[in-house]
Amino acid sequence: MTAIHTIERFIFDEQPDTAHGDFTNLLYDIALAAKLIAYKTNRAGLVDILGRVGATNIQGEVQQKLDVFADEMIVRICDHTGRLCAMASEEREDIIRIPKEYKKGSYVLVFDPLDGSSNIDVNVSIGTIFGIYRCIDWHLRGRVEDVLQPPRKLVAAGYILFGASTMMVYSTGSGVHGFTLDLELGEFLLSHQNMRLPDPPAYYSVNHAYFENWPPAVQAYARWLQGQNGDDAPTLSSRYIGSLVADFHRNLLRGGVFFYPAEKGKPNGKIRLLYEAGPLAFLIDQAGGYASDGHRPILDIVPSDLHQRVPFYIGNRALVEKAEYFLRQGNY
Ligand code: AHG
Ligand code: MN
Ligand code: MN
């Protein structure tokens, strides 16, 4: 019989000897928020939660109720535990400070509370993405500088996928592990230990509707992925959901590349460095893959703005490096 590991047990067993419990408990907190968001998401069609709130977020996009719910749930679970000194959410303009009445801890949480919001109303997979940093200076902890760290400094990252089943996938720097929520037990159970990107890869994922807006080098790369261009072209099929977490998760299990390049009118593409690209870059590195902005590793980019966007190529190393090759040739 195979052993059954709950996420709590696994996090505890995996913690380094130096851990004092804060980090471990922070991951539990996120797993708890994940269960609450999963519960709400699964009921989305049943209660009056669908439809837009009407307010627009800092990105200029219309916020939907589940975005607000997920954002508030994470903040409410994490702001008073004494484990964090600051948070930053895709849905909020400024960093989230720890209220004065609570103790400040040493960790920093960055998150995209609900990724793939255009898919909420149509019953397609959505997700939550998170990353955890340590504060730069204990005495000054809680400043915006603690948030604006390059993704290489992450001490953990992960996502929750609200799909056919709910999964939490995370890494603390020793492999990527996936847990599936057992709805009857209310527990995440270890289902995917030490996930590695398969090779050869199966898929490429991009929004082809923007093809005419891409620089010629990106167009040439897309043709190469389709096998139209070059002797070394891979044999890939195409999949694109429009929820980054879901596209990433599928490609992690099957191998492939996801990209959201720079385009006319969007010089940095759409994906946010802090809440999306950074945490996923940390995970793909741990799974044996690579993430790039087309020129350099995402892990090395120092954010200068909380909501900065970045051209994004992520997946099997050979496929991502080929994008860098095309962009170099095209001088982009
Ligand atoms: P969010 O819902 O957090 O704003 O993110 C949406 C992102 C990402 O999930 C997805 O990959 C991308 O938007 C899809 O954008 P297009 O519709 O332009 O392809
Ligand atoms: Mn998102
Ligand atoms: Mn979002």
Image (tube, rainbow, N blue to C red):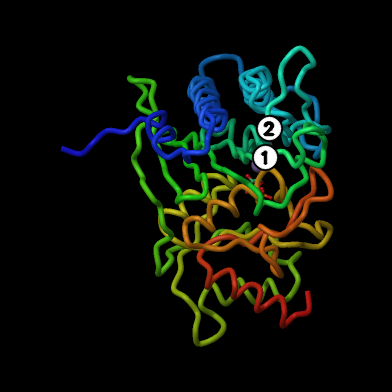
- Disc nearer the start of the sequence (1/2): 2
Position of 319 with respect to 134 (left or right) is left
Nearest the camera: 56 or 147? Answer: 147
Query: Where the C terminus falls, by quadrant?
Result: bottom right
Q: CA distance from mark 1 to mark 2?
A: 6 Å
Q: Quadrant of residue 196?
A: bottom left
View extreme (bottom): residue: 231
- Which amino acid, mark 2? Ser
| Residue carrying label 1 | 134
Q: Amino acid at mark 1?
A: Arg
Q: Residues within 10 Å of mark 2 (few under 14, many from 20)?
A: many
Q: Is residue 317 left or right of residue 303?
A: left
Residue 57 percent location from the top left of the image: 79, 32
Tell me if label 1 and label 2 are in contact, CB under 8 Å: yes
Residue 47 position in % (x across, y down): 55, 14
Q: Position of residue 80 (x, y in %)?
A: 67, 17
Task: Give residue 106's mark.
Answer: 2
**Which residue shows up at 43% across the image and 64% down it?**
202
Which residue is at the front of the view, 219 or 20? Answer: 20
User: Callout 1 environment at 10 Å: few (<14), some (14 to 19), or many (20+)?
Assistant: many
